[in-house]
Amino acid sequence: MELPEDDKTFLRDLVKASRQKIHSVKWVDRDGTARQTTLTQPEVVRLNTIAAKLKTSKNEVLRQAAHIPVAKLPPTPAPLEPKP
């Protein structure tokens, strides 16, 4: 397959993730909407670790995480005008 190395890495990671066992976590969003998040094995291990630190459940961690504000990105600078 003739693709740039970046595309090959993306595809390889995609196939690797699709071969892993997935875990679904049901939780309730801050607006009361029922959600179901699908996690890979490494993601669920990390979520379990965080939940253990907080002494709570995975779904409660996700519910609380929904209240974490999203970091604002700096504004994109205007493109430079070409010199005449």
Image (cartoon, rainbow, N blue to C red):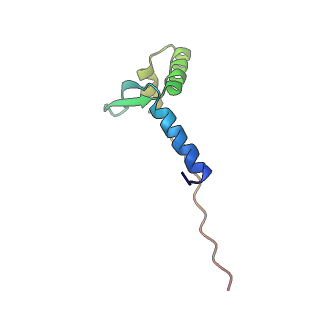
Q: Position of residue 61 (x, y in %)?
A: 46, 23
In the depicted view, which residue is nearer to us: 57 or 5? 5
In the depicted view, which residue is nearer to us: 31 or 9? 9
Most distant residue in the right direction: 83
74, above or below 56, in the image: below
Most distant residue in the left direction: 33
In the depicted view, which residue is nearer to us: 79 or 24? 24
Q: Position of residue 55 (x, y in %)?
A: 51, 13
Q: Position of residue 64 (x, y in %)?
A: 45, 27
Q: Residue at x 41, y 30 (%)?
A: 38
Q: Residue at x 61, y 50 (%)?
A: 5
Q: Is residue 46 left or right of residue 36?
A: right
Most distant residue in the bottom direction: 84
Q: Quadrant of residue 46?
A: top right
Q: Position of residue 78 (x, y in %)?
A: 59, 68
In the depicted view, which residue is nearer to us: 42 or 58? 42
Count of labels in the image: 0
Q: Residue at x 39, y 25 (%)?
A: 24
10, above or below 4, in the image: above
Q: Residue at x 45, y 20 (%)?
A: 58
42, above or below 57, in the image: below
